[in-house]
Amino acid sequence: MEKTSKIYVAGHRGLVGSAIIRKLNSEGYTNIITRTHEELDLIRQEQVETFFKKEKPEYVFLAAAKVAGIWGNNMYPAQFIYENIAIQTNIIHAAYLHGVKKLLFLGSSCIYPKLCPQPIKEEYLLSDYLESTNEPYAVALPASKCVNLTTANTTPGTSVRCPTIY
C-alpha cells in the first residue's frame, strides 16, 4: 500500500479496528476512511454498495462485527448470525464489485472448536463442536468465508485474506 492509498477500516471503533487505525496513522498513511454505524449501516446492502461506489477504497480492513458477549449470544443467536453474515457479505461483495485491490477479513479464535488442538491451525475450523456461547458469531465468519471468498479470489487483481486473531 502506498501512504496515500485509500484505505477503509470497517469496525474502526472496536478493539482490533482501532488498533489498525493507530498503526496506519503511526506508519504515515494519510487517506484512511471510516464511518460510524450511524453514518453507514453495514447490514444494509444498498448503503454499503453506495459507499463503495462513492468512496472507491483501494484496500479494506474488515474488523466489523456484531458483538455483545455471552449474554447477547445467548439471548439473540439468530440476530447475531444474521447481522454478522450480512456485514461480512455486504462488504466482501461490494469490495469485489468495486475492484478493491486487497481485503483483510479478520476473525477471532472463538470461531474454532471448543476443544481445538493447540496451537490452532486454520484446518481446525469447523472440525468439532463450537463453544455454545460463541456459536452465533462463530458460525457467521466461516459461512462468509465459504460463500464470498471463492468468488473474490478468482477475480483478477483482487486479493482477500482471512487471518485469525488469537
Image (spheres, rainbow, N blue to C red):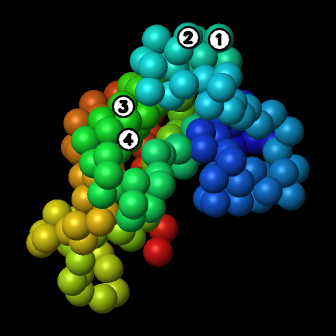
The residue under the point 25% across, 59% down is 135
Q: Amino acid at mark 4?
A: Asn
Circle 2 — which element?
helix
- Picture layout, residue 157 above or below residue 108: above
Q: Is residue 81 left or right of residue 5?
A: left
Q: Position of residue 117 (x, y in %)?
A: 23, 86
The residue under the point 65% across, 11% down is 54
* Residue closer to the observer: 87 or 57: 87
Circle 1 — which element?
helix
The label shown at residue 50 is 2
Residue bearing mark 3: 86
Q: Disc 4 and disc 3: Cα gap in Å?
A: 5 Å
Q: Are marks 4 and 1 in contact (CB under 8 Å)?
A: no
**Are there few (<14), some (14-19), or many (20+) residues within 10 Å of tag 2?**
few
Q: Are marks 2 and 1 in contact (CB under 8 Å)?
A: yes
Residue bearing mark 4: 84
**Can you tell which of label 3 and label 1 is closer to the viewer?**
3
- Picture layout, residue 123 above or below residue 115: above
Q: Amino acid at mark 2?
A: Thr
**Are there few (<14), some (14-19), or many (20+) residues within 10 Å of tag 3?**
some
Q: Is residue 125 left or right of residue 3?
A: left
**Are there few (<14), some (14-19), or many (20+) residues within 10 Å of tag 1?**
few
Residue bearing mark 1: 54
Q: Disc 4 and disc 1: Cα gap in Å?
A: 24 Å
Q: Disc 3 and disc 1: Cα gap in Å?
A: 20 Å
Q: Amino acid at mark 3?
A: Ala
* Residue closer to the observer: 43 or 2: 43
**Can you tell which of label 4 and label 1 is closer to the viewer?**
4
Circle 3 — which element?
helix
